[in-house]
Amino acid sequence: MRFTAVDLGASSGRVMSADVSADSVRLVEEHRFVNRPVRVAGTLHWDILSLYQGVLDGLRRAGPAESVGIDAWAIDYGLLDRDGALIGNPVHYRDGRTEKVTERADPYEVTGLQFLRFNTINQLACDRLDRAETMLLIPDLLGYWLTGERGAERTNASTTGLYDVTKRDWAWDLIDRLGLPSRIFPEISDGGLAELRPDVAAEIGYTTSLARVGSHDTASAVVGVPATGDRFAYISCGTWSLVGVELPAPVLTEESRLANFTNEAGIDGTTRYLRNVMGLWILQECLRVWGDPALEPLLAAAAEARTEAVIDPDDPSFLPPGDMPARIADYCARTGQAAPEDRAQAVRCILQSLALAYQRAVADAVRLSGRPVEVVHLVGGGSRNALLCQLTADATGLPVVAGPVEAAALGNALVQARARGLVGDLADMRALVRRSESLRTYEPRGHP
């Protein structure tokens, strides 16, 4: 059977066809489009209409499928008025409107969420909600435009800071205490199908159903992790890196809060116990400032380069867009280090800093959850970066299995396939990924 997976990342969107059988799953990229934010009157917005058009173009090129699933990044949202019209373009999480947020508004024992100043709960505090009738996170907003149905998918709802991880519902007491209008929070669901609107079907040339998948891209990516058993850590590596373990229940201890770990909902009632680490964003911004040179020669030079410079990828100075090479040099000056002397050293600095951040996150996840880890699975775009994978193996002292690159699209498609009875539980889905994908293992070498 054929399914279509729409996977939206912070820098690009992809529409993939997935042919799924009992023996294999095969992805074909049908359409890729740029996700470029737009600054208007000092505010950084997502160009949501351009993204929606990219989705429609991709569905048209992909052709008929059993169903369609959408996954995207978390936290950001659109507001609808009582007529269902969008109230302004969704604001980008890198916008500066939450810069003054320094303390969490949500109790960790309720939401289990890592403190990030741009979490949904903090963004809503900056919004005018008097005209808002419904808040829809990005994949739910696109799904509403495709089907006319409003709702909240659980894995993404759990990232908002307004979700009760124990009751598995909106944290209504918190919402009331913060003075947020309860009407804007739609019903949370896990699965189901919704038919495309007739006008959408006419535009793409066929009718099909939209399936609820793990709409947070990391939730879908974790489904696509080709693990055996449960003694694994994962790194979903793209613009952001999500580093953690899969657990049957959340960890809500004070130690966990102080370590800034998050408990997000996964597929089949699992908990994604993880830490958000700044990912390849820092490297992407360096490349932009340098005029977008070819990456492979830079990685080859970085593999031979030597620098002792190490940055904290999660330092607030690295969050907004801007002159990242200058910020790296400034960070080194502030911390008494010699700054990288050239581009190769700068790339080496970024990648070894990420590897060390991954090591800390994996070690903390093991310590705080009690879950032993024997292997690290690095999935997403970063799995193509051999130097990053090797440095991560060296830093963690564990074998790193790299791939699949399109883990989120695979997980998206496999959840759709399960709804049609083609595959079974998570273990079955992961076995199918192992049979279908080319994976590479990096063994640790030397001293971490």
Image (cartoon, rainbow, N blue to C red):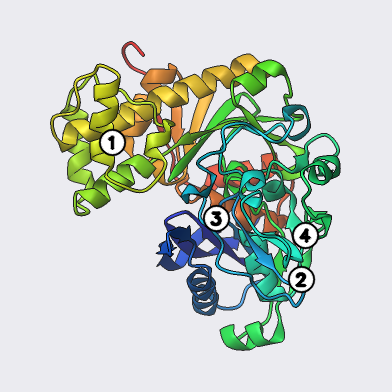
* Residue receiving disc 4: 184
- What is the quadrant of the C terminus in the image? top left
For the residues labelled 3 and 4, the Cα–Cα distance comes to 29 Å
Sequence-earlier tag: 4 or 1: 4
Q: Nearer the viewer, mark 2 or mark 4?
A: 4
- Residue 269, horizontal then vertical, whole percent: 77, 40
For the residues labelled 2 and 4, the Cα–Cα distance comes to 14 Å
Q: What element carries label 4?
A: helix
Is mark 2 in CB contact (under 8 Å) with mark 3? no
For the residues labelled 4 and 1, the Cα–Cα distance comes to 39 Å
Question: Mark 4 is on which residue type?
Answer: Ile
* Residue receiving disc 3: 409
- Residue 39, horizontal then vertical, whole percent: 41, 62
Q: Image height check: is 261 above or below 88? A: above
Front-most of residues 24 and 179: 179
Q: Around disc 3, counting alpha carbons within 10 Å, would you say few (fewer than 14), some (14 to 19), or many (20 or more)?
A: many
Q: What element carries label 3?
A: helix
For the residues labelled 2 and 1, the Cα–Cα distance comes to 44 Å
* Residue receiving disc 2: 149
